[in-house]
Image (spheres, rainbow, N blue to C red):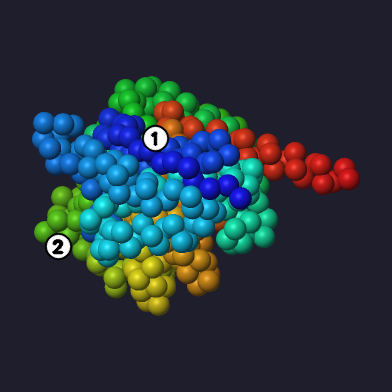
Amino acid sequence: MATIQGLWAREVLDSRGIPTIECTLWLDTGGIVAASVPTGSSIGKYESVEVRDRDQNRFLGKGVTQAVQSINTQIAPQLIGKDPTSQQEIDQLLINLDGTAKKEKLGSNTLLAVSQAVIKGGALSLNQPLYFYIQSKYKMSQTLKIPTCIYTMVNGGEHGANNLDIQEFQIIAASHLDFSNSLNMAVTMFRHLSQVLAAKNAIHSVGPVGGFTPNLYNNTDVFELLIETAKTTSYVFSQDFFLGVDAAASKFYTGGKYHLRERTEGYSSTELLEYYKKIYDVFRVLCFEDPFREDDEKMWQQITAELGETSRIVSDLLTATNPERTQKAIDKKMANTLLVKPNQIGTMSETIAVIQLAKKAGWQILVSHRSGETNDDLIADFAVGIGADYVKFGPPNRGERTAKYNRLLMIEAELRRSQLATETK
């Protein structure tokens, strides 16, 4: 049995140039793994807390040297000699060391850096691919498959440039496309969209997470553009792909109204629901993530009741990968799809427990990147291993996003080889 021989953390930069944590773990067998923690910009009030240095002379107060020190001096000595496959035991040790409900002492970023390194170490100790290790250990799916990909094409809100209110405009691959073909479609659409925008003299530069940030008159113009773009390719709207949005509605809620550039006076909650129903009818928008602010519970219930039979109502800030929040949303029927971000809760074991809760209730699972990413591709293996229905890793653009898609390509190839080997026996 392999044991943990050493653990060491350091400060690195995420894709936005903001510090985050990388944690390296050594096994006594000589194996080494490293894991880095993504960071978010659309951070909800129910998420666990990141620890930052707040020293304005370093990285505008965003440094993580205190978190790194906590790992190297406080956590690492307690993990030496432990079995890396004892994920639950180690994660509980981390939770106990912090001792706060929202990880305010050590920080969710600190705990997750270690927890991710441990799960990678566990897979390495058994000489197994990470996705296979996770499936074998937690048994949340009967078969290994690549989840359906939701690709961001256009960004607004905090991911844009004061251009649009809705945070993400997405295309969702149809089920008849395998992953390789869906990725080809996404790349083709993304490149052709650039040409369509340029032809219209619209801004065709990209924002901080890689999606286009065009200067359009209103939000629904994006749907028209995506449908128009499809006509310049071999792909057919409503046949090869559908549309989705991450509204991030809490970001455009002020003064008791939801404010979209479609009109000046703002929308009441009921009026915003009518807006969503209209874009569903006209543009076949089949995925609504964070359609209302996290405390607008009545409207979460209403949109799920009215559109939930045909659409994915995805809870992100509402549930924050938190078991109590998720159970409440399940009980009140406020969504039908759980968005999963491990750094919202702090450890891999807690993340898996929330997924198990949602799956038991019949919800679907969407595993997500964050705006501040690294080249670590753990989240791709994790999504396959837990049997996620969907993943969203951003546009097929920028290295920290394509790292995840490239990892899915590798997993797909490995699964095909495994299937072929089985069939030829």
Q: Quadrant of residue 303?
A: bottom left
Q: In the rendering, at what x and y percent does residue 420 appear?
A: 80, 41
Q: In the rendering, at what x and y percent does residue 72 appear?
A: 32, 42
Q: In the rendering, at what x and y percent does residue 337 appear?
A: 46, 62
| 142, above or below 151, in the image | below
Residue 207 visible (yes or no): no
Real-space Cα separation, disc 1 to disc 2, in angstroms: 37 Å
Q: Disc 1 residue type?
A: Thr
Contact, mark 1 vs mark 2 (Cβ under 8 Å)? no
Q: Which residue is mark 1?
A: 374
Q: Disc 2 residue type?
A: Gly
Q: Quadrant of residue 197?
A: top left
Mark 1 nearby-residue class (10 Å; few <14, some 14–19, many ≥20) = many
Mark 2 nearby-residue class (10 Å; few <14, some 14–19, many ≥20) = few
Indicate the secondary structure of the residue bearing disc 2.
loop
Q: In the rendering, at what x and y percent does residue 300 appear?
A: 33, 68
| 91, above or below 397, in the image | below
Q: Please report the residue visible at 33 percent of the width from the left and 35 percent of the height from the top.
A: 10
Nearest the viewer among 326 and 95 is: 95
Q: Give the mark nearest the N terminus, 1 or 2.
A: 2
Q: Please report the residue visible at 75 percent of the width from the left and 43 percent of the height from the top.
A: 418
Q: Which residue is mark 2?
A: 256
